[in-house]
Amino acid sequence: MEIIRSNFKSNLHKVYQAIEEADFFAIDGEFSGISDGPSVTALTNGFDTPEERYQKLKKHSMDFLLFQFGLCTFKYDHTDSKYITKSFNFYVFPKPFSRSSPDVKFVCQSSSIDFLASQGFDFNKVFRDGIPYLNQEEERQLREQHDEKRSQANGAGVLAYSSPNTSKCPVTIPEDQKKFIDQVIKKIEDLLQSEEKKNLDLEPCTGFQRKLIYQTLSWKYPKGIHVETLETEKKERYIVISKVDEEERKRREQQKHAKEQEELNDAVGFSRVIHAISNSGKLVIGHNMLLDVMHTVHQFYCPLPVDLNEFKEVTTCVFPRLLDTKLMASTQPFKDIINNTSLAELEKRLKETPFSTPNVESAEGFPSYDTSSEQLHEAGYDAYITGLCFISMADYLGSCLSPPKPCVSARSQLIEPFFNKLFLMRVMNIPYLNLEGPDLQPKRDHVLHVTFPREWRTSDLYQLFSAFGNIQISWIDDTSAFVSLSQPEQVQIAVNTSKYAESYRIQTYAEYVGKKQEERQIKRKWTEDSWKEVERKRPNMQVGFHSNSATNTVGKRNLSPSPGEGSSEDRAPGDISDLEQTESCAESLPEGRRKAKKLKRMKKDLSLAGSVADSPAELFEVPDTW
Amino acid sequence: MEIIRSNFKSNLHKVYQAIEEADFFAIDGEFSGISDGPSVTALTNGFDTPEERYQKLKKHSMDFLLFQFGLCTFKYDHTDSKYITKSFNFYVFPKPFSRSSPDVKFVCQSSSIDFLASQGFDFNKVFRDGIPYLNQEEERQLREQHDEKRSQANGAGVLAYSSPNTSKCPVTIPEDQKKFIDQVIKKIEDLLQSEEKKNLDLEPCTGFQRKLIYQTLSWKYPKGIHVETLETEKKERYIVISKVDEEERKRREQQKHAKEQEELNDAVGFSRVIHAISNSGKLVIGHNMLLDVMHTVHQFYCPLPVDLNEFKEVTTCVFPRLLDTKLMASTQPFKDIINNTSLAELEKRLKETPFSTPNVESAEGFPSYDTSSEQLHEAGYDAYITGLCFISMADYLGSCLSPPKPCVSARSQLIEPFFNKLFLMRVMNIPYLNLEGPDLQPKRDHVLHVTFPREWRTSDLYQLFSAFGNIQISWIDDTSAFVSLSQPEQVQIAVNTSKYAESYRIQTYAEYVGKKQEERQIKRKWTEDSWKEVERKRPNMQVGFHSNSATNTVGKRNLSPSPGEGSSEDRAPGDISDLEQTESCAESLPEGRRKAKKLKRMKKDLSLAGSVADSPAELFEVPDTW
């Protein structure tokens, strides 16, 4: 269902209902661009730390506009054992609410725009018909202004004139306006004495004159009349005066208040949909969703925090449960049987054995998509496909149990290991951003940071390191790159050799990261490290990941996708069966939530006991993310 | 006529013809925004120097996209004594030419976009169907790449294969590819021996395999075959090999060259229209056209120079003759009889006496506009209206002659005073940017530059200067403003008083400008001052303006538009009659050009002789630009 400015209000209840009844949602965003700085390759350096990656995306991607938001809700129908979907395609644009409201500037990237154009994207629906929105601070300010205006009017105990500049004492009327004001008063006296006339339209006049009229009337006629400014078709403003009794006055007051409230809600606009998703606390699914999540928080909640940990806090407040299908598909047990994790390819792959196409149907009144012909890159459709991929993969996990479980719910313990971990594009050995705790810190003791003259090319680096056998180069910018050697032992030799070099400089990865962190620490005030406790509690798990990834990396030469390469301690599907006991699909939400919390505790206890091998976390082999 | 990507090439000859036959053009641009920094009010401070204004516009406006370009050509028809117009509306978008071509990022301002949307602007025509373009440097690079490719191919003396990586010696084929290449060679041998077969389609293969094939064939079959890479519908690339004799080979070569030239021209795209306008050397008219000119130069020629004088040089190269109808309407003899110089109001005013509506007709095949119903802000229509305004005003000048001249040509001496002077929005006493020489330097000895705490409001400034009578405040930013006093004598008193102040600081305008210039001089390397000579030659004129503007400013209190206010040494229309002698409308171009040059010399001589009062420049009273 396509939602634009003109049909937003009339369909909002449908959106709310879909959110209310859903078991989970899938979302997707389309943006006006990806990177306003370096090319995407340079933006996603393989040796980025999660902190660096966050900083880069924040710096180079947040000036673009999220202008199409896809939401697909999935509700399980027990009777027919199928999912009922409702898919929404929202067009979003920061139309200024009034003259004084923020005038948002955003960047467009020609290649992104051209790509969307080639997919038939309708830009008029964004720029002419996009639904406006406000972030939380803007909404707060607007509500404050509104309340202030009301309390001024009420506090004065008199008529709530449209203008806040009312006055309780006589007004000083400039000489040249006295005649004008006297004429107005004369007309009002006539109105009040007349028995037939109820209203009086004054001639259009200047803003200054209107102000004088308001001030004069507020003092002269505290009761019995209602004053209002209207606009002619030619946009000329004029004042209408009506005789009213106390009851009528109150009715008009309320009417006006209701109208203002409605205008306010209109200004908050699309943000109300995001708030509803957020408040539901339900599982939100996306495919490679880090940028979607960042844009959503940035555009509809608050500018992104400086610090990654703060971002994690904000994000888990907005979206308590996220799941990234790209991460899921890149992780065991899927990693070995899924070659290409792009959304289009993943969708195709999941139609084949050992997967099965989920039983899904569009709700009545919602157009259904045909996955065999539909084009990707309409946000609503991409969200729909993402949801299908999730169901196929979740059901596959269920099918591996003994006895097999035909349908895996959005609150199943089976999928918990994938919660709140967002896929990181092309980061070596850090497959995801962990929203619920500290990020993985793979050892990178075979990696060097090299600085060199601008003229250097890849061949110069190969030559420099020719003595060290196979190397792998990851450019940072024109004058620096990471170089990973095949053996960590070679690192010190390389660093020692470089001491006598003038044109280039080599340091270890650890030295480089240490210096960068130092710089950052000097630059910013540290907020309380909210993860300290978690870190203290999970030593085993971390160490587990460390050694694992280190083993993985050493000896690896090629960054191109090569599924099945690297250590893959295959886990028989049956191994996870003990985790799936009493669950059934589509439990009632409170029940599900309680269970989720309980399971979370369980999971923690498991890892605390050091039995990492049995915990769901063990499902995560470090995926080959390239 | 609407021109988009798909009909650009087929209509280009019409555009060229219209440019070729026209007497003058009017242009107009629509942009994706106006200011990405301060609000427009802050952007256009009344005490900006032309240099400052240029720097601000360059910094805060050039990241927006000029995405609709209106061109209206006007050709005088002597037989019917009317103008024949051809109006074009070009949609422009920097669609990347190839993967390696620049990926332009541009900013959109919501309020501007929303405004255009409210006017019914079709954004799909920009983003989906916009005509691409290249600036001069991009075009040069592309042509160079192309020439290099060709010369490589030709230099090798062999077949010009599609890939430049051809080779004259045997290629080293990796072990695992040998079988593949051998099979290809086998197929080609079969093709060469067959009498029926003319072509051979190889299976789609990898880029590396294609490279190997090209290299092998270039060495093995320097003659007799033609090799080409094509794409399947699924975008898979495959190689086609054809048997060809020498003649056929040459024909294909030429075909390919022609195709490449065409692709190159397609990439240059809309810039070709601007080049044609530029090369014609004809008069180009715009309304308040500084931003249009800046964007046009920036987008289709080169990034704007750092220095204003360099900008003037570049601009006069691109557009040798410009005329701004807003400046014209703000200058005597029009200033006194035209209240509002906005395009819409100007157009209305010029339909009334003493002006007359020009006799204008659309050329056959071109849609005609109805000025009584048409909406503004379609660039083609705005350009059309701008041209009409010019004709009305020019004809009015003619009607003031004795005997009256019914039609004033685009090369008439009467309009020369308006050449190459671009209207400056809201700059006190500097009505225009002078492209042909140094800018006006009005005395500002009644102006103070004040720095103060961020908390200060306008009222604080009024209080600070309460002893000085009427003042006029012009905010620069949150902590500084210009304050102009009614008497220059008060300036020193204010500066002296402030010496003991701690919270604020006052300096004279001269001190402020001096310091700023010093900073700039330190910052940048000075290019040869190209105006030095002109400056030396025109002392009288400058002094004339100085004293004039100084008189004008002193005693002025209100910056709001107040036509007729200020000194207006009325010039009887007859006074300029001696300048109009033998001219007639629509002279042939070479004749007109020669005359224009002669008149230019004449004008210079006049001002050199000090007879400012009689020179056309005297037409410029300093307009009340607010």
Image (cartoon, coloured by chain):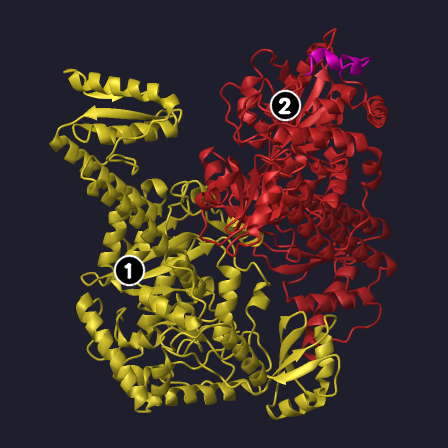
Chain colours: A red, B yellow
Q: Is residue B198 left or right of residue A406?
A: left
Query: What is the spatial separation of the Cα atoms under label 2 and label 1, in whole angstroms?
Result: 75 Å
Q: 10 Å neighbourhood of mark 2: few (<14), some, or many (≥20)?
A: some
Please name whichever residue, B535 or A232, is drawn nearer the observer in this view of the structure: B535
Q: Residue furthest top?
A: A403
Please name whichever residue, A607 or A463, is drawn nearer the observer in this view of the structure: A463
Q: Secondary structure at mark 1?
A: strand
Percent position of residue A513, x then y: 66, 47
Q: Residue at x 43, y 69 (%)?
A: B326
Percent position of residue A364, x then y: 64, 19
Give the mark toward the camera: 2 or 1.
Answer: 2
Q: Name above or below for residue B165 compared with residue B541.
A: above
Q: Which residues are magenta?
A: A571-585
Which amino acid type is marked by label 2?
Answer: Ser
Q: Residue at x 38, y 90 (%)?
A: B540
Residue corresponding to mark 1: B74
Residue corresponding to mark 2: A567
Q: Is residue A176 left or right of residue A145?
A: left
Co-location on one chain, circles 2 and 1: no
Query: Does A183 appear in magenta?
Result: no
Please name whichever residue, A156 or B478, is drawn nearer the observer in this view of the structure: B478
Residue A576, quarter of picture: top right
Q: Residue at x 57, y 74 (%)?
A: B560
Which amino acid type is marked by label 1?
Answer: Phe
Residue A364 in sight here:
yes
